Amino acid sequence: MSETLNRQAEIKALCKSLGDAQDADNKPELMALLDKLCAVRVDEKLLRATGAGQVVGKLRNNDDSAIAVMAKKVVHKWKKDVMAANSRGVSPASTSRPASRSQTPLPAKSAQDSSRAQFQQLKPATENNSSAISPSAGNGVERTPPKTSSSYTTPIAAAAVSTGSVASTLADSTKPRSAVLDKANIALSGDNTRDKCVEILYNSMASDSNADVELLTKRALGIERIEFDKVKGRTTPAYSARIRSLCLNLRDKKNPDLRANVVDGSISVERFCSMTSEEMASKDLRKTIEKMKEENLFKAKGAGRTEAATDQFKCGRCKQRKCTYYQMQTRSADEPMTTFVTCTVCDNRWKFC
């Protein structure tokens, strides 16, 4: 339940930042936030609770083609997540209905097939023997009760139990590190809000790290202290929003270099806290942003004047004939165009009609 609430809070924070970036027309920030949303795994319930689908869906018609394409990519990926989640939810119900009619376990494996076949072969013989033998005490024959399907499903149940125990062991061994599992001593400030912020910072850095608990604790406490000092020692909404933003960047699966550099000290906590979202972005995302900037700059350039070199004009100052000129319509349409001439030797300029 807590994991679901954390994911809801994470998506809501990203959507709020997405709306702010859209209002400010900050296209690099929009690209970075959409990239993070694309990495989030969702289901139908999560999308309904956060309203993220509507927020991202509106960006599919954005004027910037790169943002529109990225938004469509996020929506397409989320649709696949929802379909996968729905199929996982339907499969248990669909497999339980046939079992209730046949009263025998489903032949999911070869061991189940063989056990079921043995049971079907032995069942008629057992019933015939039980009907032929009289329950009289004089013949000294004791009727043996027929074996039930449970005796044949016992090996399968044991295999299922052993498989489940192995799966749970593997799940525990691959479970991400956290402050709780590492038993990190992070409750140092006495403020629940600050301690919680330190915990989520620790979890964001420790998820796939092999660093010592003490080092991770030191980094988390250092980042929290800097952000706390920025708000003059008060746990304001701006403080919480900034901590969430830093955690989202640290937790980005597509940007492991940032996380590793902060943990090993290549990026100091002071430098990390002063970085913008664009500076924290991965190399691939930075290249995409730079390419988008160049395209926007190219599109923003208007049609400039075109100058041509000629020797048909003589400069009145230096008497040279090395000039460039261009023409523009400065008067009414039925009037001749105005010619602007520039001497390339002395930079003398004149015009005539």
Image (cartoon, rainbow, N blue to C red):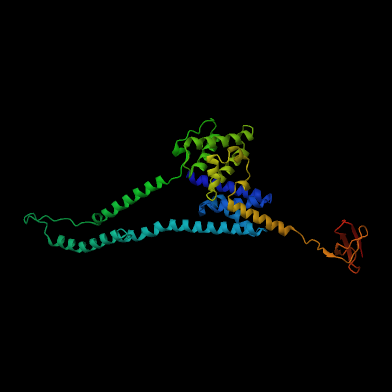
Foreground residue among 180 and 303: 303
Q: Is residue 12 left or right of residue 107?
A: right
Q: Residue at x 53, y 57 (%)?
A: 77
Foreground residue among 39 and 328: 328
Foreground residue among 244 and 283: 283
> Residue 27: where, in percent of width, then height?
66, 52
Extreme-right residue of the structure: 316
Query: Which quarter of the figure is the C terminus placed in?
Result: bottom right
Q: Using the rendered image of the protein, determine whether residue 87 is visible from the camera's viewpoint.
A: yes
Q: In the picture shown, does residue 334 fall above or below 202?
A: below
> Residue 81: where, in percent of width, then height?
50, 56
Q: Is residue 189 left or right of residue 142?
A: right
Q: In the picture shown, does residue 184 fall above or below 118?
A: above
Q: Residue at x 25, y 63 (%)?
A: 117
Q: Residue at x 54, y 44 (%)?
A: 259
Q: Residue at x 18, y 61 (%)?
A: 126
> Residue 294: where, in percent of width, then height?
68, 56
Foreground residue among 229 and 353: 353
Extreme-bottom residue of the structure: 334
Q: Using the rendered image of the protein, determine whether residue 51 is visible from the camera's viewpoint.
A: no
> Residue 199: where, in percent of width, then height?
51, 38
